[in-house]
């Protein structure tokens, strides 16, 4: 494993990390979740990602039990939660980024994960109904109270992140350190263009999600989705419809050729491609099987095979380089 600084913070996170969306407490049983976490930890992963909304709190409960059972020293791993969507309740007091829900969401996540503090705490989406000052102050106070160590955002715009920094600066508060955006071969603009200034000005770190576009970049799918995958799970039609297109599958077929020439599997090529971006602090992996995770862990070494010439060939196939503003 290799490690990268989380933006300009001093915290070093493993280049690959493990997330639990749709898997823990839902698609997979707890014994598999345990094996995944053990494989990850043994492979040098030091960051486990979670959120209050994942399986309505069950994902955190499962992860918390495993962390407790494993008894890994607390100073060898980091864990996150995210607040905004709530853990099931939909009343206005139970969702959002106002002080009440952020504080209660944090306390509930600490209980479910059975930890004394969260290493990373994310605002899962921007909240149009709460003044940014209220959220920034609350996050700062949670850090001061020792309940969280770093705070960040997820799927915020560059402007929203900058506003949070300006408020923090004005009041001498601790601003957001990291953003959690989607980033993969099919979804590039935010990380490659929109955040460009933020890497320079505020030293933004990124913990990127869905590096395989929910598994499509693994190369195992046909247009109706692979039978035993999340894309065929009940209630996830929206995900299949959004992610699985004929155009994408065509590109994946071509990319498989590039992977084969390098003696890499398709998922490993796609993950290594994410790692080639220096603004990515950690690539959050998802896995429903231990074999998948073991395979994906090899992406750390595989990134060395993605020379500028190989990256150029990939770019030609993708044909989706985000346009940079010309000024
Ligand atoms: P991916 O896009 O990498 O999808 C992971 C899924 O792809 C696996 O669960 C598995 O699904 C399939 N897969 C993974 N590896 C392989 C392989 N080697 N061969 C074949 N299939 C494979 O990541 P996720 O979408 O899971 O996102 C990762 C994490 O990011 C989440 O767990 C979560 O922590 C975070 N996240 C954050 C969001 C946010 O808004 N902040 C939103 C979404 C995710 P299957 O076996 O079912 O096909």
Image (spheres, helix red, strand yellow):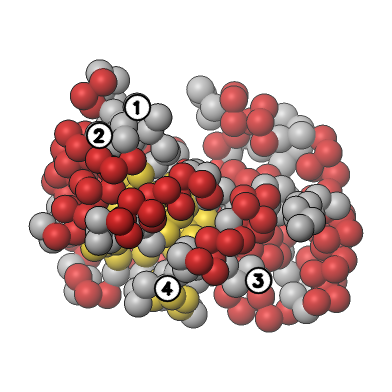
Q: Which residue is mark 2?
A: 98
Q: Which residue is mark 4?
A: 8
Q: Marks 1 and 2: CB-CB under 8 Å?
A: yes
Q: Which residue is mark 1?
A: 129
Closer to the chain start, of discs 1 and 4, is 4
Q: State whether residue 83 appears in this view.
A: no
Occupied quadrant, residue 261: bottom right
The secondary structure type at the circle numbered 3 is: loop
Q: Nearer the viewer, mark 3 or mark 1?
A: 1
Tell me if residue 318 comes above or below residue 129 in the rendering.
below
Q: Within 10 angstroms of label 1, few (less than 14), some, or many (20 or more) residues?
A: few
Q: Marks 4 and 3: CB-CB under 8 Å?
A: no
* Place of residue 115 in the rendered image (x, y in percent of width and height, measured from the top left): 16, 57
Q: Which residue is mark 3?
A: 276
Q: Within 10 angstroms of label 2, few (less than 14), some, or many (20 or more) residues?
A: many
Q: Residue at x 85, y 76 (%)?
A: 309
The secondary structure type at the circle numbered 4 is: loop
Occupied quadrant, residue 214: top right
**What is the C-alpha distance between the residues marked 3 and 1?**
37 Å
Q: Residue at x 42, y 59 (%)?
A: 178
* Place of residue 76 in the rendered image (x, y in percent of width and height, measured from the top left): 27, 75
Tell me if residue 141 comes above or below residue 59 in the rendering.
below
Q: Residue farthest to the front?
A: 170
Name the one closer to the observer, 263 or 14. Answer: 14
Q: Nearer the viewer, mark 3 or mark 2?
A: 2
**What is the C-alpha distance between the residues marked 1 and 2?**
8 Å
**What is the C-alpha distance between the residues marked 1 and 4?**
30 Å
Closer to the chain start, of discs 3 and 2, is 2
């Amino acid at each position: 494993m290799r490690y990268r600084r989380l933006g300009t913070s001093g915290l070093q996170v493993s280049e690959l990390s493990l997330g639990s969306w749709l898997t823990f407490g839902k698609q997979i049983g707890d014994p598999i979740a345990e094996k995944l976490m053990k494989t990850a930890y043994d492979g040098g992963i030091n960051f486990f990602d979670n959120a209050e909304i994942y399986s309505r709190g069950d994902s955190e409960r499962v992860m918390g039990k495993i962390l407790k059972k494993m008894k890994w020293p607390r100073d060898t791993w980091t864990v996150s939660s995210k607040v905004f969507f709530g853990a099931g309740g939909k009343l206005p007091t139970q969702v959002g980024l106002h002080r009440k829900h952020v504080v209660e969401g944090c306390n509930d996540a600490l209980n479910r994960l059975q930890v004394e503090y969260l290493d990373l705490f994310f605002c899962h989406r921007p909240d149009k109904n709460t003044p940014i000052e209220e959220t920034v102050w609350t996050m700062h106070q949670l850090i001061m109270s020792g309940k969280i160590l770093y705070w960040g955002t997820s799927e915020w715009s560059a402007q929203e992140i900058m506003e949070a920094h300006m408020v923090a600066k004005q009041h001498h508060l601790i601003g957001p350190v990291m953003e959690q955006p989607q980033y993969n071969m099919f979804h590039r603009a935010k990380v490659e263009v929109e955040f460009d200034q933020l890497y320079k000005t505020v030293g933004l770190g990124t913990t990127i999600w869905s590096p395989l576009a929910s598994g499509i970049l693994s190369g195992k799918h046909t247009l109706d989705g692979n039978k035993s995958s999340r894309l065929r799970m009940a209630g996830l039609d929206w995900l299949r419809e959004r992610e699985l297109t004929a155009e994408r599958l065509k590109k994946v077929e071509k990319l498989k050729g590039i992977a084969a020439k390098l003696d890499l599997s398709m998922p490993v090529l796609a993950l290594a491609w994410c790692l080639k971006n220096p603004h990515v602090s950690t690539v959050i992996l998802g896995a429903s099987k231990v074999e998948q995770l073991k395979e994906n862990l090899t992406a750390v070494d595989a990134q060395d095979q993605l020379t500028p010439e190989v990256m150029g060939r990939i770019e030609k196939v993708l044909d989706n380089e985000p346009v940079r503003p010309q000024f």
